Amino acid sequence: MTRNAKDDLQSDQRSEPDQQSASDELSERKLKRGWTTGACAAAATKAAYLGFLTGRFPDPVQITLPKGERPSFDLVESRRCDQAARAAIEKDAGDDPDVTHGAIITAKVCRGDPGNGVIFIAGEGVGVVTLPGLPIAVGEPAINPGPRKLIRSLIAEIAHAHGDGGDLEVTISIPGGEVLAKKTANERLGIVGGLSVLGTTGVVIPYSCSAWIASIHRGIDVARATGYEHVAAATGSTSERAVRDFYGLPDQALIEMGDFVGGTLKYLRRHPIPKVTLAGGFAKISKLADGHLNLHSKRSEVDLDGLADLLAMRGASGELLDQVRSARIASRVLELASAAALPLADDVAENARAFVLDQVDGRAEIEVMVFDRAGGLAGRARGWA
C-alpha cells in the first residue's frame, strides 16, 4: 500500500486565500454566486446613461449578461448635471473571496465627439495598461474586452430607443482600487494605478479559481510580449522569492503558478517560452514528479513509498527507508535524506523535469528547482548549460 505524507503548507504558501480548502469546507451548502466588476460597471453605465438622457435613474437597474442571466443591481449613488451623469453600484461577489467584494463601481457618462462612439476612461482606482501582451492596448484603461463589449451593447440599445447618437465618454472608477490592486497581480502585469475591470460572463463562480488561472495566462502573455526568454513559475511565495533572487529575474518574468501546474503547462505548450524554471517546495515538486498536475493537498499527496524507492536506488540503509516510509510530513523525508548525504531532491527534480517536458511537448527547455522551507536550494535538474 502506498503511504502518503501531508504537504508542508507552511513552508511554501501564498498570501492569497486557500481557495480549494475553503471550497471543500463549504461544499455541504449551496454557495452564492456573485457578479464581476465588469457586470457592475455595465449596470452602472446603463443607469448613468438613462439618467443622463431622461433625468430618471432606474433603481434597481437590470442588465442581460452574455449567457442570458438578468441580474438587478441597486444603486448606491445617482447624480446628474447638465454635462454628465453618474451612477454607482456596490459589488457583490457572493461567497467568493474576491478582493473587490464590497467595492463601489462607478460609471460617469458625458458627451463625446460625434462619430467617436464609446470612449473608455480610467477613473480613480482603475488601472492603465503599460505593457504589451494583454488583450487591451498599452495606454488604455484596464477594462477587459468582455465588459467593453457589454457596455457598448447596452449603450447602443439605449441610444437606439431614445434616438441618441451614443457617442459617449464612459469613465469607470473604483474608489480605493489602487490599494486593492496591491493584492492582485496587476502591477506584475504592467497594470498601474488600480484594478482591472474583468468578467467574460459577468458571473463570479465561488472558489472556481478561474481568476487565478486567467492571471497565469496573462502573466505568460506579458512575458512573451515583452521579450523574456526565461521565466520562472513558482508554487508559492518562498520558492518565488528564492528563484527570483537566484536568477535576478524581474517581476514580469515570474509566473504565480500556485498549485495550478496543469493550467500553466497547458498554456505554455500553446504559447511557449524558450526557457522555463519550475520552482517549489519539496512536497509540491515530489507530487509533480509523480505526475500530478494539481498540487493542492486535497487533490494529490506525496508518495512516501516512491521516495523510499528513490533512496533505495541510492543505496539507503533499511533503517533509513523505514524512517522515510513512516514519516508524517515530506520535509522530514528531505531532512533524513540530507543527513545521509543522499541527493533525493535532485532525483525528484529530475523526475519532475521529465514529466514536465512531456507536458509541454518539448517546446521549451525545462529546469526544476526544489527549495527547502528556508528558501535554500535543495535540488535541481537543469535543461540547459
Image (cartoon, rainbow, N blue to C red):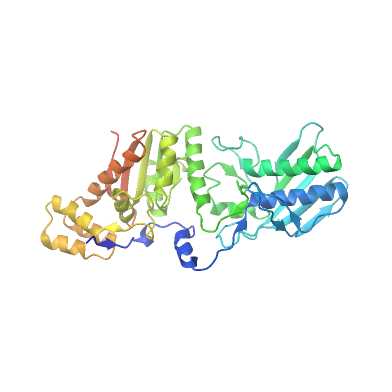
Residue 364 pos. (x, y %)? 36, 34
Residue 138 pos. (x, y %)? 61, 35
Q: Is residue 144 visible?
A: no
At x 64% / y 53%, what residue is drawn? 177
Q: Is residue 68 visible?
A: yes
Quadrant of image for the C terminus: top left
At x 29% / y 36%, what residue is drawn? 383
Q: Nearer the viewer, residue 218 or 277?
A: 218
**Residue 246 figure quarter:** top left
At x 50% / y 53%, what residue is drawn? 209
**Residue 316 figure quarter:** bottom left
In this rendering, is residue 226 above or below 30? above
At x 87% / y 52%, what residue is drawn? 55
Q: Nearer the viewer, residue 383 or 338?
A: 383
Q: Nearer the viewer, residue 309 or 347?
A: 309
Residue 120 pos. (x, y %)? 71, 40
In this rendering, is residue 33 above or below 188? below
